[in-house]
Amino acid sequence: MEKNNFKNLTLDPENWDEIREIGHQMIDDLVDYWKGIREEPVWKPIPSEIKSTFETPIPNQGKSPKSVYQEFKETIFAYNKGNVHPRFFAWIQGTGNPMGVWGDLLASGMNPNVTIGEHAPLYVDKQVVNWCKSLVGFPEESSGILVSGGSMANITALTVARNSYKTANIRKNGLQKTEERLLIYCSQETHSCIEKAAEIIGLGTDSVRKIEVNERFEMIPEKLESQIQADLAAGYSPLCIVGTSGTVNTGSIDPLDELLKLSRKYGIWFHVDGAYGALCKLDPSYAGRLKAIEEADSLAFDLHKWLYVPYEIGCTLIRDKNKHRASFAITPNYLLPENRGLAGGLDSLNNYGFELSRGFKALKVWMSLKEQGMEKYKLMIAQNNRQAEYLGKLVESKAQLELTAPVCMSITCFRMVVPNFTEDQHRELNREILLRLQEEGIASPSSTILNGKFTLRIANVNQRTRFEDMELLVEEVLRIGNSILSASTESE
Ligand SMILES: Cc1ncc(COP(=O)(O)O)c(C=O)c1O
């Protein structure tokens, strides 16, 4: 009786031609979107009647694929964030690339769970991890895992550092049985995910020593060494030094060579957060300063930033494969490996990270690198760096603008200045410039505060940006800034 009630229900369509047609339409619409994106506003506000559609409950009955897609176009597609646009420069967010999108589409359609088992996607995942090692010069015998992004990549690495700490067997005992106070050293400019990671792995934020930076926003190694010595003298246990290759605020680079030396001198784990800037190593202008990445105990970096592939994907690399595996390996009865059949093949990726179920995120990288080749990526990254430097020069050529940090990697920080303005007036002026740039759809920088100065921040990991976009940006900042200034003079 029950059996008859269900009539072999499925979510597959009754009419395969209809779903094929709508799929073709989606591809056409995406290609038109990318092709014409330069002529569109970077961003536009979402009307409240559209926002209210996101508060409706789950429909009881479904509707046709065509009408679902139509609703998506009107309410979602039309109000995207804008990081596909050539003048999106906010935070540090990649553009995505067409072949990467097709990679995600195929990955989703194939839908493998890329953790365990004998199937091609697991070999692709392994190949992409190996390619990640060669992109940054990590040794072949190291290990790695693809994760959702930089934050996950950093906490994965710090977990391995913590679990490898001397003979404490923290994995078994937790931190409850250790009297030692483990410490992480990073700079004042380090990304907040390191602090979050310290909280989650049980060290707490008081265990994060934020070392002072110099005028170029780079960690001062002498300050680091004195802090380590003071901590040792007080009986604390230095666990890990985190150097950043490309800080989120200004793109600055910690003195990685010196941090590496100190880590070896004191027997401390050396981790590099290269979420944004590890791949900058591919630009010959930066390769020398980033060479020490190759010697790090662990590295975290994002592929959705400077490899331009669609969200999400980051990578953790660990120099000592055994320490990596010993940190996560676990084999419950329901995950037994075999030497033949579906459960045969490679070591389960469950043994190298926290996540069990994993999507086929490697495919978008595999397809993109095959399509473009390494040389093209080297040029793309160098192009972003040269565009940032070009913007820096444009800023320096205008009396009404000032750089608020040295240009490093592909981040340019600047603001409009008016003689005799207070800091509050500068903040108000530059905030208004920022908001109008966004609201008029011209460009999307973000902001930060550097040494107390409110600043426009242009972070360029954009594969669509052209040099002329930087010229337009400067012209528009001046146009908007001067119109704000003249309106306020008129109203006085
Ligand atoms: C230096 C640095 N570390 C970590 C992160 C966090 O990476 P994600 O946003 O991919 O989690 C970022 C993000 O911008 C970053 O710039």
Image (spheres, rainbow, N blue to C red):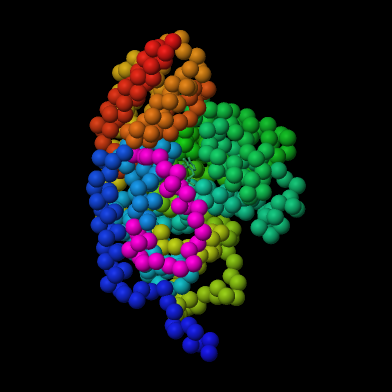
**Left or right: where does residue 353 sit relative to residue 237?**
left
- Residue at horizontal 35 percent and vertical 62 percent from the top: 67
Q: Is residue 45 magenta?
A: yes
Residue 55 coordinates in the image, percent (x, y):
50, 53
* Relative height, residue 153 to residue 354 (above, below): above
Which residue, as the protein is rendered here, is positioned at the far front?
49
- Residue at horizontal 26 percent and vertical 36 percent from the top: 466
Count every numbered label the image shows and give the total. Answer: 0
Q: Nearer the viewer, residue 437 or 223?
A: 437
Residue 400 coordinates in the image, percent (x, y):
36, 16
The quadrant of the image that shows the C terminus is: top left
Residue 385 in sight: no
Residue 6 coordinates in the image, percent (x, y):
48, 82
Highlighted range, magenta: 42-70
Q: Nearer the viewer, residue 150 or 477?
A: 477
- Residue at horizontal 54 percent and vertical 61 percent from the top: 355
Where, by quadrant of the figure, is residue 103 drawn? bottom left
* Relative height, residue 84 to residue 17 (above, below): above
- Residue at horizontal 70 percent and vertical 55 percent from the top: 174
* Relative height, residue 67 to residue 39 (above, below): below
Q: Is residue 306 magenta?
A: no
